[in-house]
Image (cartoon, rainbow, N blue to C red):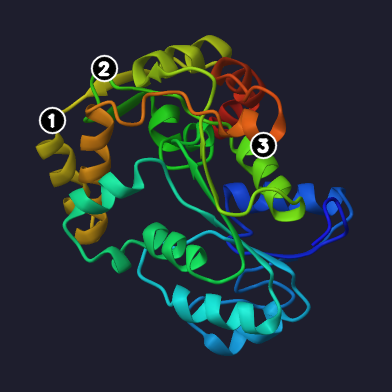
Amino acid sequence: MKANSETAVLVTGATGKVGRRLTERLRSAGHDVRPASRKAAVPFDWFDRSTWAPALEGVEAVYIVPPDEPFPVDEFVAQAVESGVRRLVSQSGRGLRALVEAVDAPPETVGVYAAQHAVQHSGVEWTVLQPNNFNQNFSEGDYRDAVLAGELVLPLEGVAEPFIDVDDIAAVAAAVLTEDGHHGRIYELSGPEAITFAEAMRVISDVSELDVAFRSESHEAHLAALSSAGVPELFVRFLDAMYQIMREGALAEVADGVRAVLGREPVAFADWAAGAAEAWSSGRQ
């Protein structure tokens, strides 16, 4: 694949936070993008193998966003390579090795681990992206409802994390999918500074019409609440392990992946929040 050439790319998870932005970036740069979802023009379903071949036809590179549940990634990667895909990029997460060890479950049942392992052993060019917690989780993800309600409750007292703007992840993904020089690399991606969840809530309060606070609770109480809400047991264990890793400070150090790939600093949380203020205002209407 020639650097900066027009590249045909399949983007899985195309309706998600990263996938939407990545699709837009690739199209704007003139690449042939095939967004993958069950309702796409060319339907794609991880669990329906009959959808794989049409989605992969003519594709040179694939961006893999793993689902939470176990999925047949080894079989998909093998078929992708057979169909002519020459570059695979998997979205993973920081602290993956420690997380897999802590979750006390077969590694293949952890989607991000299975996907990373599959691309690394694919026999074609591969890159893995390991981002921190997303800024957008506060505006369009798991934390949004709590932020709008005025209180975010997590078992993370005093825990600092260099939250990352999803636009930075998409920019890095677009580069490694379409440019040479990233084969065999695992890029850890973070924002430029670590802040606590309480500090994040203060920043959001300062730039929006919200008055939102952070409250810590014990991990036992938090996990009990998740279980009562019907969250699957394996995912509860996954979250418990992730929170423990965060409490130990394993994800607090700033990573240099954005700078290494893009040659610039990542977006600061406060700058992102100022631009996202409208999202919270519209959510209150």
Q: Amino acid at mark 2?
A: Gly
Asked where in the image residue 265 lies, by quadrant, the reply is top right
Left or right: 46 as drawn, with respect to 62: left
Query: Looking at the image, is 118 positioned above or below residue 19?
Result: below
Closer-to-camera residue (139/45)? 45
Residue 212 seen by the camera: no
Q: What residue do we see at 71% from left, 28% from top?
A: 263
Where is residue 97? Give x, y as percent.
Answer: 31, 49
Left or right: 198 as drawn, with respect to 101: right
Closer-to-camera residue (150/53)? 53
Where is residue 58? Give x, y as percent.
Answer: 78, 78
Q: Secondary structure at mark 3?
A: helix
Q: On residue 261, which mark appears?
A: 3
Mark 2 and mark 1: Cα distance apart in space: 13 Å
Kindly identify which residue carries mark 1: 218
The 10 Å Cα crowd at callout 2, few under 14, some 14 to 19, many 20 or more, is few
Closer-to-camera residue (30/225)? 30
Where is residue 38? Give x, y as percent.
Answer: 60, 74
Q: What residue do we see at 79% from left, 62% from top?
A: 1
Q: Amino acid at mark 3?
A: Val
Image quarter in which the C terminus is found: top right
Q: Amino acid at mark 1?
A: Ser
Asked where in the image residue 143 lies, by quadrant, the reply is top left
Q: On residue 148, which mark appears?
A: none
State yes or no: discs 2 and 3 in contact (Cβ < 8 Å): no
Asked where in the image residue 224 lies, by quadrant, the reply is top left
